[in-house]
Image (cartoon, helix red, strand yellow):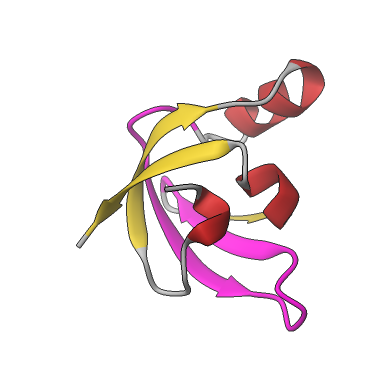
Amino acid sequence: MLLSEMKEGQKGRIVQVGGTGALRRRILEMGIVKDAEIYVEKYAPLRDPMELIVKGYHVSLRVEEAACITIDDIR
């Protein structure tokens, strides 16, 4: 599943970070790396951007950028 498809309150583990160039590098620098646990805290009122918790801190990410990240759902 893609990160952009997750609902508020869902947890997942990052399987793959896609994208290329500066966008991919920026995502990795924010701590969104393979095997990290990620929690979707909330979406903005118009569903873009989304607020995530990764490694204990809050990160906002556009839904378009989140579509490059593959997630394994954790129940």
Relative to 18, is 20 on the left or the right?
right
Q: Examine the rendered structure and indicate whether residue 68 appears above or below residue 49.
A: above
Q: Nearer the viewer, residue 34 or 3?
A: 3
**26 relative to 35 in the view: left or right:** right
Whether 24 is drawn above or below 4: the answer is: above
Q: Is residue 57 visible?
A: no
Residue drawn 63% across and 27% down? 29
**Residue at 40 percent of width and 43 percent of height:** 71
**Quadrant of the rendered image containing residue 25:** top right
Assess whether residue 22 is covered by the magenta stretch. no
Q: Position of residue 50 (x, y in %)?
A: 64, 64
Verify whether residue 47 appears in magenta. Answer: yes
Q: Is residue 60 left or right of residue 41?
A: right
Residue 47 x/y as whole percent: 70, 73
Residue 75 versus residue 8 in the image, above or below = above
Tell me which residue sits at (56%, 74%) in the image.
42
Residue 32 to residue 25: above or below:
below
The structure residue drawn at horizontal position 62% and vertical position 47%, both measured from the top left corner, is: 66
Q: Where does the magenta region start and end? A: 33-55
